[in-house]
Image: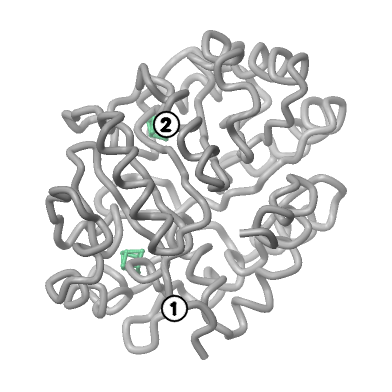
């Protein structure tokens, strides 16, 4: 049963450029524009009318955009919940300007071992993560550590938790890796690793959406009965100011947003693509977290029940539940 019939999240790609070159990501290879403030303002107004609650200013590396603080400020002024994930190379320079503008600030860290983290990210960013944590805490921010879990780095979770997350009273988010297109993300997470993650998810200040684990146990999305609601739960805007449907990773169609995103989103041509969300040939077995998480929240099924407890707990810890109640 569908519970929410409107988009709840916007993945706003401010640029595809990145100053890292992670082995499990191909976005940094794309040439890219940067979004403009005028378009962001117009689109935020439309997103508000469409009922979107959360804006994820993403990339690439979102802090490469020189006006990222202005986008966040606009979104906050309009009552959106904001989120941003950074590799931390530029966070120390931005910290003061971003202070108070990001409700869910995520610092990516996938290894306790500095050399391994830098190797995986293709750039020396480990020390910047540690510096960023210190700076953010000194400003009163509560960043989360976003740990992308591979089969290869599962033994690094506890050292990061015990030596970095716990002493700094930070939430450690476990983000099970997902494959897409031709990107090499290593071997799929084994059943024993999935079980291990569920065990870790019970520890204080570790956040794990159990529906991610269930979805992997079930073999991902299935085209004949899709859990994916990418296009109808999430709006994707590209750096070229295009609406991408049904998701960034499949990008079946893109539509230039001339000036009215709301009209475009409700147009028949967009609806005709959205109706194939989760049903396209590339959708079989998909576990892409960025779209599955909002999908879990809009339809009543077993994933909704699995996802709900951790979602509520996390939003209480981040203080975002108050905004969800008020908006
Ligand atoms: S930092 Fe993020 S956007 Fe950049 S290459 Fe790595 S995963 Fe991709
Ligand atoms: S199943 Fe995956 S690839 Fe298909 S629309 Fe959903 S998120 Fe995109």
Residue at 13%, 48% (x, y): give it.
258
The circle on residue 160 is: none
Q: Position of residue 316 (x, y in %)?
A: 78, 53
**Of 303 and 45, which appears nearest the observer?**
45
Please, what secondary structure does the residue beneath circle 1 have?
Answer: loop
Marks 1/2: CA–CA distance: 26 Å
Q: Is residue 246 above or below residue 61?
A: below
Q: Is residue 167 above or below residue 299?
A: above
Does 72 sit left or right of 172 as displayed? left
**Of 219 and 268, which appears nearest the observer?**
268
Residue at 66%, 34% (x, y): give it.
145
Please, what secondary structure does the residue beneath circle 2 have?
Answer: helix
Q: Position of residue 242 (x, y in %)?
A: 19, 48
Report which residue position mark 2 lands on. 71
In the displayed orientation, state which residue is furthest to the top.
93
Number of numbered discs on residues: 2
Please tell me which of labels 1 and 2 falls first in the chain: 1
Q: Is residue 12 above or below residue 197?
A: above
Report which residue position mark 1 lands on. 5
Q: Position of residue 186 (x, y in %)?
A: 43, 47
* Label 1 CB-ligand 2 distance < 8 A: no
Q: Position of residue 80 (x, y in %)?
A: 53, 47
């Amino acid at each position: 049963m569908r519970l929410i019939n409107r988009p709840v999240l916007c993945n706003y790609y401010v640029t595809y450029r990145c100053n890292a070159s992670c082995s499990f990501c191909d976005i940094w290879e794309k040439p890219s524009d940067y979004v403009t403030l005028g378009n962001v303002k117009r689109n935020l107004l439309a997103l508000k009318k469409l009922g979107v609650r959360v804006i994820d200013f993403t990339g690439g590396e979102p802090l490469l955009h020189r006006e990222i603080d202005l986008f966040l400020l606009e979104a906050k002024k309009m009552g959106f919940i904001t989120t941003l994930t950074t590799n931390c190379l530029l966070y120390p320079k931005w910290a003061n300007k971003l202070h108070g503008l990001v409700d869910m600030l995520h610092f990516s860290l996938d290894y306790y071992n500095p050399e391994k983290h830098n190797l995986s990210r293709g750039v020396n960013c480990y020390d910047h993560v540690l510096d960023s944590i210190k700076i953010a805490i000194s400003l009163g921010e509560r960043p989360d550590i976003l740990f992308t879990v591979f089969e290869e780095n599962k033994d690094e979770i506890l050292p990061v938790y015990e030596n970095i997350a716990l002493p700094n009273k930070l939430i450690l988010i476990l983000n099970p890796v997902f494959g897409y297109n031709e990107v090499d993300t290593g071997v799929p997470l084994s059943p024993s690793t999935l079980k291990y993650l569920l065990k870790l998810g019970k520890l204080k200040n570790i956040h794990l959406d159990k529906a991610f684990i269930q979805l992997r146990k079930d073999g991902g999305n299935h085209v004949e009965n899709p859990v994916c609601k990418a296009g109808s739960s999430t709006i994707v805007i590209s750096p070229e100011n295009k609406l991408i449907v049904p998701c960034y990773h499949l990008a079946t169609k893109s539509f230039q947003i001339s000036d009215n995103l709301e009209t475009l989103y409700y147009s028949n041509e967009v609806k005709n693509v959205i109706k194939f969300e989760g049903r396209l040939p590339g959708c079989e077995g998909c576990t892409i977290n960025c779209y599955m998480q909002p999908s879990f929240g809009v339809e009543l099924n077993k994933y909704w029940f699995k996802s709900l407890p951790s979602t509520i707990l996390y939003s209480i810890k981040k203080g975002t539940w108050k905004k969800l109640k008020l908006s």
